Image (tube, rainbow, N blue to C red):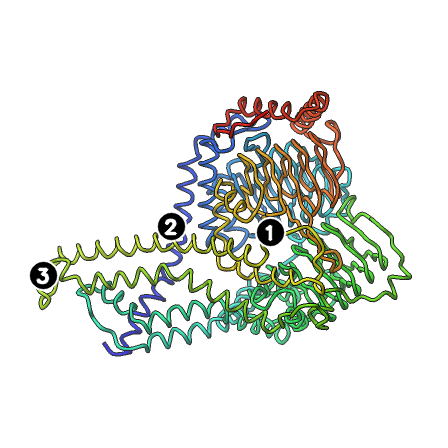
């Protein structure tokens, strides 16, 4: 067949699967639902029937029910939601199919994370914006499931977790990054401030209702249909131009040769050619490394030249402004800058250039975060020189009251997990610490230090000296080393950082494409030797039976080779990260590692880029013993029966060799990070988590902090650097306070904290750690944990 015939095979290889993709997605979601109902249906029916009688449903970690829960959770992780993420209506349909009870008139953002669907009951008129609704937690060696009931007009925004047994009353609002804790009973007409929790219900106020972003109006259906979707389609088509070029060259790579008597065999042998394999893999590499830049260029063109930049003012009205905001959210809300953020080195001037092109006012020597800012209204952002950003920060420039600029003064620091509301102004050399909430239209003085969020705003930690801060130099160690070249080692230039990031990404794509390449090559060998396999005359075509035998052999060889190769590649990726860690750092030691004094941060950036090779494979080990082995290989000191990140990390441990975790500890989606980057002063400090300690979702142990045995960090909690959470205590707040059994807690939490307080008093009275170990063994036996424990010497 001539070169044009290659297009026929090309259509079969590329475009026919595209037509069938919708059917495959539907089948995939059907498999997920079938698996979920088959594996856990009976247990969840039992859970729903007994929820009214029992405050909690407990199942031992590592037991049979935990295993079934983990299998379903992995199915959901692998398959995703497919086409059901199209809009709120399709997502609600998905949730109902999975067993959740969703009332009418609900508005759910596709970014909201749901799980354990049978235990979710949402009333009419509820709205969710990037929230987390999972009736799962851990305590005392058990996984705990509790039914979540959210009442009429309850809104959960940008939150991390709506916790088990939560019952929200009518007209309640759960605002940006707020957490509803286990057993909470939210009264009617309760409006939480952003970055809060149900433990802090006293801070609720109806004034915060204007911050609910999901209630903001959007463009009409006709505006989306005739203007919005064509603009998004234009951006997508432009992004695919490099890939289409590779596909065209693939189709021209030689003539079709029929080395098989079957159509499938001919297609396999055709694509097994060396030149075609090269073009096929190159097309995949181009999709991941070149297409994002085309997409970004098209998105900037649409934002600047077609839609125009927005202006601050009163609440948005009119179809064109609403369309501008809607298209911007579709293109930039995920913070990845059209997936170019990880390709340009993240922290450097290239990121500033992109933000300027999008309309932001950006100064010099900015240290951008490891994960991009969650914002799509860049024209309202003003950043002065020498600002340091932490990861997972939201910049919200528009609410129900209108849009306003957000300004950040020179030399300031916006730490991780901050939320900047419209009109907030961060002064010169000011620090907005971890989890800080900048109030709407609030000004934070020069040189002051703020942290966390209580009563609807950040807590003042140190007023500082505004006069000295207004005149003090703002350049930081990062700026001196990277831009002024004033370091005691060779600093990799910015262009080379981008080059190695792109090269590593391309290598990762090639590695992940290896299983299909190997399968095609082995399949081609089978089809080229089909006559030898069936002992038939090479001059005659195979009959029906022989052809079926060859196809069966080919399918078996190709599928088997895919599985084996994928297993080998996964193992290689894991060990490559372990090797890279020890080669680049050895065993980390506590101390100061400023950019201008140590090459540690430069090596750290290389290591982060190398993590692209293993991708999200670690996510499939979460909540298992294999994840513990992985972190032990990286240097962590982890005890027995430790459960790590069953619902994901936020992030997972970044410096494992400085972390010590005792037996039977549980860490859910919490932050255990040993580095501290305070205004460019980078340091490493050890973290210690005692035996039986629990970090619930939304909690954080800051660099240098310590948790003693049987300590619990409740939702929305941080233990600051150098602080000690003593044995048997429970802590809550950002920053944390030790909580009492009767202070604003659910009945379950009262009993749980009282039990720990009593046990702590007994253990202190006896003065022996073995007493606390005996108490834990007794609880484990009572709960029926089946895992064996390494024998200890008392």
Q: Position of residue 566 (x, y in %)?
A: 38, 54
Helix, strand or loop for disc 1 = loop
Q: Nearer the viewer, mark 3 or mark 2?
A: 3
Q: Camera-side residue: 286 or 586?
A: 586
> Splitting the image into 4 quarters, where does residue 412 fall?
bottom right
Q: CA distance from mark 1 to mark 3?
A: 62 Å
At x 67%, y 53%, the residue is 213
- The crowd level at tag 2 (other Cα within 10 Å; few <14, some 14-19, many 20+) is few
> Which residue lies under the disc numbered 3?
536
> Which residue lies under the disc numbered 1?
587
> Splitting the image into 4 quarters, where does residue 724 fall?
top right
**Which of the two labelled residues, at mark 1 and mark 2, occupies the earlier sequence position?**
2
Helix, strand or loop for disc 3 = loop
> Which residue lies under the disc numbered 2?
27
Helix, strand or loop for disc 2 = helix
At x 51%, y 72%, the residue is 234
- The crowd level at tag 1 (other Cα within 10 Å; few <14, some 14-19, many 20+) is some
- Discs 1, 3 touching: Cβ within 8 Å: no
């Amino acid at each position: 067949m001539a070169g044009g015939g290659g297009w026929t095979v090309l259509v079969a290889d590329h475009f026919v699967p595209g037509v069938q993709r919708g059917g495959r997605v539907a089948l995939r979601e059907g498999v997920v639902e079938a698996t979920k109902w088959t594996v856990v249906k009976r247990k969840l029916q039992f859970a729903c029937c007994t929820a009214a009688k029992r405050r909690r449903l407990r199942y031992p970690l590592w037991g049979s029910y935990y295993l079934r829960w983990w299998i379903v959770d992995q199915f959901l992780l692998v398959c995703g939601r497919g086409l059901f993420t199209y809009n709120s209506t399709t997502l609600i349909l998905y949730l109902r199919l999975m067993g959740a009870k969703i009332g009418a008139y609900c508005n759910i953002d596709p970014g909201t994370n749901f799980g354990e669907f049978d235990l979710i009951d949402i009333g009419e008129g509820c709205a969710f914006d990037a929230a987390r609704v999972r009736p799962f937690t851990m305590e005392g060696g058990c996984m705990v499931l509790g039914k979540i009931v959210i009442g009429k007009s309850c809104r959960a925004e940008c939150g991390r977790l709506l916790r088990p047994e939560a019952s929200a009353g009518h007209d309640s609002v759960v605002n940006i990054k707020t957490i509803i804790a286990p057993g909470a009973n939210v009264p009617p007409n309760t409006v939480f401030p952003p970055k809060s929790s149900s433990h802090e219900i006293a801070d609720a106020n109806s004034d915060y209702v204007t911050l609910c972003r999901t209630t903001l109006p959007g463009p009409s259906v006709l505006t989306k249909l005739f203007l919005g979707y064509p603009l998004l389609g234009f951006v997508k088509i432009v992004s695919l131009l490099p890939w289409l070029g590779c596909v065209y060259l693939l189709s021209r790579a030689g003539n079709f040769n029929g080395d098989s008597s079957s159509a499938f065999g001919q297609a396999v042998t055709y694509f097994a050619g060396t030149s075609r394999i090269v073009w096929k893999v190159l097309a995949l590499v181009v999709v991941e490394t070149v297409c994002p830049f085309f997409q970004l260029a098209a998105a900037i063109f649409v934002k600047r030249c077609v839609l125009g930049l927005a202006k601050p003012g009163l609440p948005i009205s009119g179809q064109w402004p609403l369309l501008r905001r809607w298209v911007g959210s579709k293109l930039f809300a995920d913070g990845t800058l059209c997936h170019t953020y990880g390709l340009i080195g993240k922290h450097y001037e290239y990121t500033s250039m992109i933000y300027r092109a999008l309309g932001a006012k950006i100064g010099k020597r900015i240290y951008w975060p490891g994960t991009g800012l969650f914002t799509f209204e860049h024209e309202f952002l003003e950043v002065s020189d020498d600002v340091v950003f932490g990861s997972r920060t939201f910049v919200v420039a528009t609410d129900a009251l209108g849009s306003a600029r957000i300004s950040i003064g020179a030399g300031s620091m916006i730490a991780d997990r901050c939320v900047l509301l419209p009109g907030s102004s961060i002064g010169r050399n000011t620090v907005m610490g971890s989890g800080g909430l900048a109030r709407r239209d609030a000004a934070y003085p020069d040189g002051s230090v703020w942290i966390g969020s209580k009563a609807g705003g950040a807590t003042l930690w140190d007023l500082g000296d505004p006069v000295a801060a207004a005149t003090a130099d703002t350049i930081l160690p990062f700026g001196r080393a990277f831009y002024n070249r004033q370091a005691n080692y060779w600093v990799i230039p910015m262009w080379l950082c981008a080059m190695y990031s792109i090269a590593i990404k391309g290598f990762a794509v090639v590695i992940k494409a290896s299983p299909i390449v190997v399968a095609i090559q082995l399949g081609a060998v089978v089809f080229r030797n089909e006559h030898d396999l069936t002992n038939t005359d090479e001059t005659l075509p195979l009959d029906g039976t022989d052809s079926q035998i060859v196809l069966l052999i080919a399918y078996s060889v190709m599928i088997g080779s895919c599985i084996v190769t994928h297993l080998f590649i996964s193992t290689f990726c894991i060990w490559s990260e372990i090797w890279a860690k020890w080669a680049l750092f050895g065993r980390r030691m506590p101390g100061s590692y400023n950019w201008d004094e140590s090459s540690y941060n430069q090596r750290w950036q290389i290591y982060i880029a190398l993590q692209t090779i293993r991708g999200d494979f670690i996510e499939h080990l979460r909540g298992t013993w294999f994840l513990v082995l992985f972190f032990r290989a990286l240097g962590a000191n982890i005890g027995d029966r430790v459960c790590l990140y069953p619902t994901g990390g936020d992030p997972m441990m970044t410096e494992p060799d400085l972390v010590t975790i005792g037996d039977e500890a549980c860490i859910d989606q919490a932050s255990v990070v040993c580095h501290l980057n305070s205004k460019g002063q980078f340091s490493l400090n050890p973290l210690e988590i005692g035996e039986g300690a629990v970090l619930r979702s939304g909690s954080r142990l800051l660099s240098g902090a310590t948790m003693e045995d049987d300590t619990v960090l409740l939702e929305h909690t941080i233990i600051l650097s150098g602080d000690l959470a003593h044995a048997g205590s429970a802590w809550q707040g950002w920053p944390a306070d030790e909580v009492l059994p009767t202070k604003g807690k659910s009945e379950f939490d009262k009993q749980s904290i009282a039990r720990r307080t009593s046990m702590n008093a007994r253990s202190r009275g006896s003065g022996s750690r073995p007493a606390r170990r005996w108490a834990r063994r007794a609880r484990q036996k009572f709960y029926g944990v089946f895992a064996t424990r390494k024998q200890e010497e008392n």
